[in-house]
Amino acid sequence: MNSWLIILFNSILLFFLTLVVTRFMKKRNLSKVTPFEFISYVVVALIVTLISLDIIANIYFGLISLAVWSLMPIILDYASMKSKWIYNIINGKERVLIKEGKVMEDNLAKERMTGQEFLEELRSKKIFNLADAEFAVMETTGDINVSLKADKKPVTSYDLGIKVASRAEPQTVILDGNILNEGLTNSGLNRNWLKTELENKGVVLENVFIGEVDSSGDLYLDLFDDVIKVPKTQVKEMLYASIQKSQAELMTFALETKNESSKSMYLRNAEELEHVMKKLEPYLLR
Amino acid sequence: MTVGSKVKQTLAALKGSEAILRLYSLKERDKEARVIYTEAFEEISKIKIDLEKRVSYIEFEEPQYKGN
């Protein structure tokens, strides 16, 4: 057989073989692998290259080596899922670098990291003052994760004591002018609803790049033609304003009427409405 | 404008809010939010009933303004 035929055959075979093998490997960001994982990837890549270029004299030797290097990581992954001990041996342990705001110089030395490098890493996490860091740990992949001091952490709505609306995830219903049925069914809507909604907004389907339905079933559109302004749905803001107006009117009635029983009825309902407004505020005015 | 027609206006506005809240309580996909909308809808329904009673009382008192 011609040698170019062998190379062609081997390459095609290995192309699909590698495709299958990598599908079974762990899904990992390449920048987040441990050094050992990186080496095993490189070895697999090299073996594949060598076999497909027919540099290895006996193709079966190459395949055996490839099988070992691609199957062993998979086996070890499963083993480390079952046992913490095996996991620690393979991946090593994370190392604490800052504890209670103090740098652990010994652990830094164990990772062979200079103070300069450490500060650089912290800066890349947007920590320019060492004093802001409460706790830092080096993960097995070499990544450094830092927890800030309580008073340096970004404020959340929980800290402020504000109630925020809980929302379901938005669903994409139009992409590139095509209706996506999956998004529609997930949000419990259908094509007819979408068509009327588009008609209400005065937009043709072909002009829509992305259409998204938010948690409360309102449609947001991004058009190909950016000159056209899509009317923004302000139903919620209007609803809140309308309830607020009704509440004010009830208060006026309560002041105007001379009848004691209806006065108390108006007052009670005005209070009730105010209570409703407070509850609805995070949902209607976001 | 008479008191009766003013109350009727408020009643109409409340009915509108009630309907929109009902709509949102059905459309909303998040469970927690749906409960909030339903509660608000029920509260406003109660207020609406109180106001309706008041309107019919006013109409009884001042029949000459009935229908305004």
Image (cartoon, coloured by chain):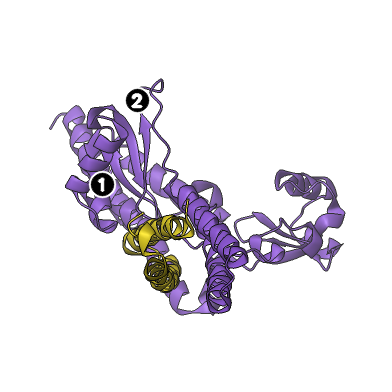
Chain colours: A purple, B yellow
Query: Viewer-nearest of labels 2 and 1?
Result: 2
Q: Quadrant of the N terminus of chain A?
A: top left
Residue A238 x, y percent position in the rendering: 47, 48
The answer to whether residue A123 is visible is yes
Which secondary structure lies at badge 1? helix
Q: Nearer the viewer, residue A145 or A50?
A: A145
Left or right: A185 in relation to B46 = left
The answer to whether residue A39 is visible is no
Residue B17 location, quadrant:
bottom left
Please, is residue B13 above or below residue A88 in the view?
above
Separation of disc 2 and disc 1 at Cα? 54 Å
Residue B33 x, y percent position in the rendering: 44, 65
Which secondary structure lies at badge 2? loop
Left or right: A278 in relation to A212 = right
Subunit under mark 2: A
**What residue do we see at 64% from left, 68% from top?**
A93
Quickly name the residue at label 1: A59
Label 2 CA crowd tier, 10 Å (few <14, some 14–19, many 20+): some
Subunit under mark 1: A
Q: Amino acid at mark 2?
A: Phe
Please, is residue A193 above or below residue A256 in the view?
above
Residue B11 x, y percent position in the rendering: 41, 61
How many numbered circles does the render carry? 2
**What residue do we see at 80% from left, 47% from top?**
A119
Quickly name the residue at label 2: A224
Residue A5 x, y percent position in the rendering: 16, 31
